[in-house]
Amino acid sequence: MTTVDVDVLDNPAWTSLRGPQARFAEVRGRAARYPSDVSPFSALDDPGDPSAWADLAALAGPGGSAMVPGGPDTAPPGWELTGVIPGVQLVADGLRAEPDPEALVLTAADVPEMLDLVDRTQPGPFLPRTIELGSYLGIRRGGALVAMAGERMRPPGWVEISAVCTDPTYRGHGLATRLIGAVAAGIQARGETPFLHTATTNTNAIRLYEAMGFALRRHLTFGRYGVIETQERHHRGE
């Protein structure tokens, strides 16, 4: 098993935004978030502390919302829980990773096709500037982008593999496995360790990841929370 610090994975968005991805961070006190066109994730230095949630409410603004990886199952004061995705976190443990000669480095010019592929396959959040978070690789068939995977959150020493998706016509050809291995090879070449998240309901993906050499580290909730507007604001018409 890896010897790097695993504790940073307990709060991966926070340790990413206050560490290697600080250039993306919008910060208010003990809360931070990515720009809305980069990632939907927000983070707190202590998700159990109401004062940190007060900072996040100030950052989100009246009627605003936040998606928090590893967020609480009940809404903190001043917030309502509007959605929950039960998930799992897996870390590389004996992963066999290698470059793939067919994998192409995707750039900003490819974003329209990437967004279209994500829209058709629903692997999770991918926004117009998500590509800025790390390296993204794709495979083309007949000139069309049919599969991709890339890097998202970056806690110190770790890189999350994300946006793993394949056009339904090309599923079953092993493209996702190849791209995960190629992205992971690039991560390992930099001396970092791959990890990833997926929904607990995505059992096929979990089996694939475990077969490749990822191991379950923990269960976590991806919670979406909304700021509750006060009666005073309503009375003022704000």
Image: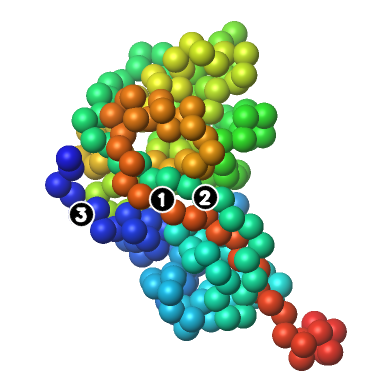
Q: Is residue 141 visible?
A: yes
Residue 106 located left or right of residue 122: left
Point out residue 236 in the picture as x, y percentages from the top left corner: 83, 89
Q: Which amino acid is tagged 2?
A: Pro
| 132 shown above or below 121 | below
Residue at image coords 55%, 16%: 171
Q: Which amino acid is tagged 3?
A: Asp
Q: Helix or strand or loop: what does disc 2 sit on?
A: strand
Alpha carbons under labels 2 and 3: distance apart = 24 Å
In the picture, residue 22 is in which quadrant?
Answer: bottom left
Is tag 2's residue or tag 1's residue first in the polypeptide sequence? 2
Mark 1 in CB contact with mark 3 (< 8 angstroms): no
Q: Quadrant of the N terminus?
A: top left
Estimate how packed mark 3 is, as few (under 14), some (14 to 19) or many (20 or more) residues with alpha carbons within 10 Å: few
Point out residue 189 in the picture as x, y percentages from the top left corner: 22, 33
* Circle 3 residue: 5
Residue at image coords 56%, 50%: 85
Residue at image coords 63%, 66%: 81
Q: Between label 1 and label 3, give the one nearer the viewer.
A: 1
Tag shown at residue 86: 2
Is tag 1's residue or tag 3's residue first in the polypeptide sequence? 3
Q: Which residue reaches farthest top?
A: 142
* Circle 1 residue: 219
Q: Which residue reaches farthest left?
A: 3
Q: Helix or strand or loop: what does disc 3 sit on?
A: loop
Q: Helix or strand or loop: what does disc 1 sit on?
A: strand
Alpha carbons under labels 1 and 3: distance apart = 18 Å
| 183 shown above or below 146 | below
Mark 2 in CB contact with mark 1 (< 8 angstroms): yes
Q: Which amino acid is tagged 1?
A: His
Alpha carbons under labels 2 and 1: distance apart = 8 Å
Is tag 2's residue or tag 3's residue first in the polypeptide sequence? 3
